[in-house]
Image (cartoon, rainbow, N blue to C red):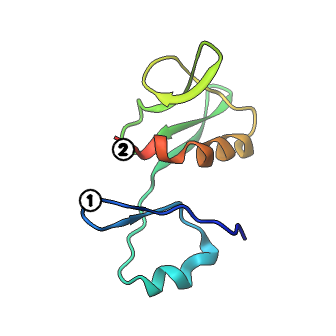
Amino acid sequence: MDKELEVRITEDGNLESIYKDDLTDLYSDLGRVTVERASDVEFENGGWTVRCHKDPQKAIRTIDDKISVGYVGNIVSFKSRESALAKEVELFWELIGE
């Protein structure tokens, strides 16, 4: 289990974080828990892509050989699902940000 967990508190007092199965006891202690999908990792056109669940046009893309989250540039096609998932976690806050 990772030793660190990044949590953000929204303006309305909700906590946001990447869900981890081994933290279910912690989640239960916090009270009512709602789990929402933040992104989609799907096999498209011969590779794995990562898109924002609420806005599928917002995706992990490349512009000038730089990988970031946005609406402009080519959607990155990862060779393996594992590499797509790793980049999804790395760019999690950008994917869910407004």
Q: Is residue 33 left or right of residue 82?
A: left
Provide the secondary structure element on which disc 2 rests.
loop
Answer with the quarter of the image where residue 83 lies: top right
Q: Nearer the viewer, mark 2 or mark 1?
A: 1
**Type of the residue with mark 2:** Lys
Which numbered marker is on residue 54? Answer: 2
Report the residue at 37% width, 38% height from top.
Answer: 55
Identify the residue shown where x is 61% and y is 49%: 89
Q: Earlier in the sequence, mark 2 or mark 1?
A: 1
The amino acid on which the numbered mark 1 sits, given as a three-letter code, is: Glu
Between the C-alphas of marks 2 and 1, the distance is 19 Å
Q: With 91 as the anchor, is 54 left or right in this view?
A: left
Q: Which quadrant is the C terminus positioned in? A: top left
Q: Taking 23 as reference, is 69 above or below it? A: above
Mark 1 lies on a secondary structure that is: loop
Residue closest to the eye, 37 or 45: 37
Quarter placement of the N terminus: bottom right
Q: Dot 1: few (<14), some (14–19), or many (≥20) neighbours within 10 Å?
A: few
**Residue 11: mark in rendering:** 1
In the image, residue 31 lies at what x, y percent? 37, 84
> Does 47 sit left or right of 68 as displayed?
right
